[in-house]
Each structure stands twice: as structure tokens, then as C-alpha cells.
Amino acid sequence: MTLWLVDASVLLAREDLDDANHTQAVQLLAGPDPLATLDLAFYEVTNVAVRSWHDESAARRLCERISAVADDGGLVRADSQLLVNAALIAAEHGISAYDAAYVAAARSANCQLVSCDVRDLVSRGLACLPTDAISGPPSPR
């Protein structure tokens, strides 16, 4: 089994029926593999649900989903070392500190980051898409 660290975009795709990654996000989040996320996800999903979607009930469902991941031991808390690492990653790759924090969290937990953010994370090789995660890790050559 592979440990997948999901960012807020995967959690949001699970909630958004119109998201291109919705089906794969549902499969990944309901699948057998263990999941983790960063504590930042609570803030990010709430912000999108309340400010963009104007849907407080979606915010509640999303936070419950993150809490379920946390209850299974999959919540990575941002600490000073993770934030130092995130700053270095952000500078190196020209991405936001928020995205870099997920990369740093995945690296510290020795797991694969899953994101729907093609532009900033997937295209740079810093994360894989949910569809790649549900198809499993690459086979050794």
C-alpha cells in the first residue's frame, strides 16, 4: 500500500461534481490506501466552500472529511522545520508557500503528493494527479 498525501484541490474535487478530477478523487478518497493531508487543508477548503461556492454545508462536509483522515493518523501539522523547507521549495520552484508546504509535508512523511494543480505541482513533477494515484505507483523496472 502507498501512503498518499492529498492537497486541498483533491478534497475540493471530491466535493465538486463539475470538477474534471471528481470521479478519481472520489475513488482515491474511498480507496484502500492510507491517506494524509496537511493541517492547512482545513483553511483552504473552508475558504473555497464559503467564499467561492457560498456553501457552508460543503465547508462542514469537507472539514469532516479532513477530520476523518486526521482520526486515522494522517494529519501532518505544519511546524517550523516544515515551513523552512516549504520556503526553500517555494523559492526553488517559483510556487506559493501554500503549495510548497504540501510538497514539504509529503517529503517529510515519505509519501506521494496527490494534487489537481497541474500548473504548479503536477507539471513540475512535484505531485501526481488522482487518476495516477488510483492506478497505483509505477512498477519497478
Image: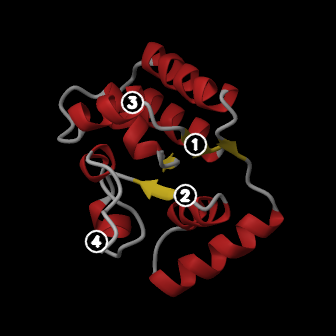
Q: Which residue is mark 1?
A: 36
In the image, taking residue 79 as reference, residue 6 lies left or right, namely: left
Q: Nearer the viewer, mark 3 or mark 4?
A: 3
Q: Nearer the viewer, mark 1 or mark 4?
A: 1
Please name the residue shown 60% across and 36% down the image.
42
> How far is disc 3 from disc 4 in space, using C-alphas?
25 Å
Question: On the image, which quarter does residue 16 sit in?
Answer: top left
Three-letter code for the amino acid on which mark 4 is drawn: Ser
Please name the residue shown 49% across and 25% down the image.
62
* CB under 8 Å between discs 1 and 2: yes
* CB under 8 Å between discs 1 and 4: no
First in sequence: mark 2 or mark 3? 3
Q: Is residue 126 shown above or below 46? A: below
Please name the residue shown 64% across and 71% down the image.
86
Q: Give residue 108's position: percent from left, percent from top.
A: 67, 64
Q: Which residue is mark 3?
A: 31
Q: Give residue 54's position: percent from left, percent from top.
A: 39, 23
Three-letter code for the amino acid on which mark 2 is drawn: Cys
Q: Nearer the viewer, mark 1 or mark 2?
A: 2
Q: Secondary structure at mark 1?
A: strand
Question: On the image, which quarter does residue 84 sit in?
Answer: bottom right
* CB under 8 Å between discs 2 and 4: no
Q: Nearer the viewer, mark 2 or mark 4?
A: 2
Q: Which residue is mark 4?
A: 123
First in sequence: mark 1 or mark 2? 1
First in sequence: mark 3 or mark 1? 3
